Image (tube, grey):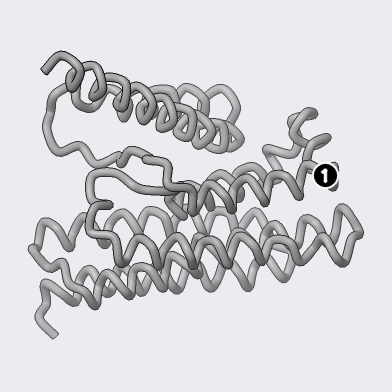
Amino acid sequence: MNLKYFIPSLLTSTNIFLGSAAVFCAVEGQTDLAVYLVLFAALFDFADGFFARILNAVSDFGKQLDSLSDLISFGFAPASILYYHISTNLNSNLLAFTPILIVIFSALRLAKFNIDPEQKSSFKGLPTPANAIFLITLFHSDSTKISFIETLLKNDIFIVILIIVLSTLLVLPLEFFSLKIKKLVIRENIFQIILILSGIALFLFFGIAGISFSIILYIALSIFKSIFGKKKSNEIFSTD
């Protein structure tokens, strides 16, 4: 294999390793360690795409391998963490299996991404890494020390609604912006800048729970950008 193709594949394989290890840790009750493993997997998920682009090593093989790794790290791993939380804190055997929906809809999301050539500068549906990061940081032990989060996560109805909403967002044909910055122009990257600066502030103030709040902000900004962008396009079109 050509070295330039080997490097992205090695990074993607590391993503698979970390995601798989996170699943093993979650079922053994080491959920905080599983959270950190998924977060590191997200870094490698970013790195494999970054190096594939700068090395001009983008390939169909790499794209398929990346999606398979994402299903493990950002579908099955967070579902495993959620399963452990439900089975140990809510004592509901039936409810404990609802995280399977996260795995199923993550697979649907990734399959759609693989066959849609338009998802390059933006995404249709909530990206699986964002969904996973929201879930795992919400269920981290430091987050559950915040009283209102602890109360919500002990509520069966909230857990079911959370899973249904996230599963829907994964496949909803709503445009979510990418964090990739192609041009160093503030006006063209204003939403990315707002998210990054706000995310840092939220993390410093709330700790790891601030990361989950950042994903909520990302969803809100994407919805706003989608609506605002459509209105702006309609205004331009109406003046022609």
The amino acid type of the residue labelled 1 equals: Ile
Q: Position of residue 70 (x, y in %)?
A: 43, 65
204 vs 94, nearest the viewer: 94
Q: Residue at x 56, y 37 (%)?
A: 212
Callout 1 crowding tier (Cα within 10 Å): few <14, some 14–19, many ≥20: few
126 vs 87, nearest the viewer: 126
Q: Position of residue 211 (x, y in %)?
A: 52, 36
The part of the image, by quadrant, that contains residue 206 is: top right
Q: Viewed as shown, does residue 186 lie left or right of 201?
A: left
Instruction: Report the residue marked by disc 1.
Output: 157
239 vs 207, nearest the viewer: 239
Q: Position of residue 111 (x, y in %)?
A: 40, 67
10 w.r.t. 99: above or below:
below
| Residue farthest to the top, as pictured | 239
Q: Residue at x 35, y 74 (%)?
A: 13
Q: Viewed as shown, does residue 147 lie left or right of 9?
A: right
